[in-house]
Amino acid sequence: MTEVKECQCAGVDATLKLGGEINTLPNKCEREDNWIAMDPSKIEEIKKFVEEDYKKRTGNNLMIEFVKTTSKSPSGVIYYGLTFTANDGKEYRAQVKEEVNEELAKQLVCFQPIEVDCY
């Protein structure tokens, strides 16, 4: 059965249907040695999707200006976590399960403004 999670996505209430278990990352930067670089083609794919998705949800244009790309393997499953700033001056996070081969919309776990707290 497809799991459904309520979350704030780009400041808009949205219900995202997800396949598999959800890995919820805290609004905190992880230690850098836990992260590895992401494939640049994947970055562009996700960036394009997020901009289009935001336009659909809000009717506004979101321009991603800077992307901090990271990926992590909790329990052997790779997740891509993107933290990026946009033209509204806010920071957002998009989190994607790497092994899901469905269209990107089903891979997007959540994307929302975050307060980045690094240690």
Image (spheres, grey):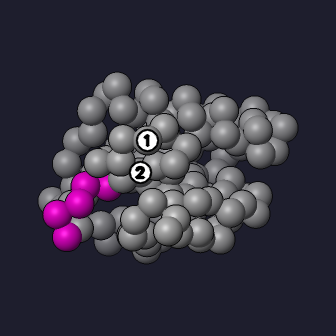
Of callouts 2 and 1, the N-terminal one: 2
Residue 56 as seen in the image, left or right of residue 10: right
Local SS, label 1: loop
Residue type at numbered disc 2: Val
What residue is pinned by disc 2?
A: 96
Task: Kindly identify which numbered label has been placed on residue 102.
Answer: 1
Q: Quadrant of residue 28?
A: bottom left
Residue 23 percent coordinates (x, y): 39, 70
Is residue 25 among what the camera can see?
A: no
Task: In the rendered view, tell whether residue 31 sits above or below residue 47.
Answer: below
Residue 73 as seen in the image, left or right of residue 70: left
Q: Quadrant of residue 115?
A: bottom right
Q: Which residues are magenta?
A: 75-79
Are dots 2 and 1 in contact, CB under 8 Å?
no
Residue 13 percent coordinates (x, y): 76, 63
Write the residue at 44% across / 54% down: 95
Task: In the rendered view, tell whether residue 46 sits above or below residue 15.
Answer: above
Mark 1 closeness class: few <14, some 14–19, many ≥20 residues within 10 Å: few
